[in-house]
Amino acid sequence: MGNNLTTSNQSPTTIRVLGVVLIFIGVILVGSMAAIIMWINDAMNNPSSTTKFNGTPEQAKITFLILGMVTAFGFTSIAAGLWQALTGKRNKKVIFVMLGLWVVLMILAWVVKYSF
């Protein structure tokens, strides 16, 4: 029983299928974050918009930072899924990048929760 993140009892076919699932999740994340970013940008910069952003410039920056990090997580998910779908193996470096992005997102969420 190894603790290696890239070693598992799953077959290459299962890992490929999970890679396709990761691609799907990544596309949903990237697409939804792009739509939200465009919607918020319109609310901030278009005076005739029906939706208004009443936050401070600092809140706008942290909002776009978090949305950007989620988008980066989505792109990393797509990359990991492509790797898994093509090779039938997991890539340890991509797994650590995804874990690192998750940690940064959790820290940002904590900062936002306790600073505003």
Image (cartoon, grey):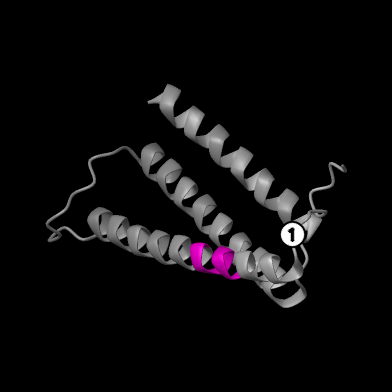
Query: Residue sitting at 66 percent across and 72 percent down?
Result: 82
Q: Quadrant of residue 40?
A: bottom left
Q: What is the x, y in percent for residue 94?
A: 73, 58
In the foreground, 96 or 84: 84
| Horizontal relation, residue 4 to residue 77: left or right | right
Which amino acid lies under the numbered mark 1 shown in the image of this protein? Gln
Query: Residue sitting at 68 percent across and 44 percent down?
Result: 100
Which residue occupies the extreme bottom position in the image? 86
Q: What is the x, y in percent for residue 60?
A: 37, 44
Chief SS of the magenta region: helix
Q: Quadrant of residue 8?
A: bottom right
Which residue occupies the extreme top position in the image? 114
Q: Quadrant of residue 57?
A: top left
Which residue in the protein does label 1 denote?
A: 10
Q: Is residue 4 above or below residue 87?
A: above
Bounds of the magenta segment: 20-25
In the foreground, 90 or 57: 90
Image quadrant holding the N terminus, namely: top right
Q: What is the x, y in percent for residue 31?
A: 42, 67
In the foreground, 9 or 108: 9
Query: Residue sitting at 34 percent across and 64 percent down?
Result: 35
| Horizontal relation, residue 72 to residue 34: left or right | right
Disc 1: CA contacts within 10 A as few (<14), some (14-19) or many (>=20): few
Q: Is residue 26 above or below residue 57?
A: below
Secondary element at tag 1: loop
| Magenta span includes 41 | no
| Horizontal relation, residue 3 to residue 10: left or right | right
Q: What is the x, y in percent for residue 33?
A: 41, 59
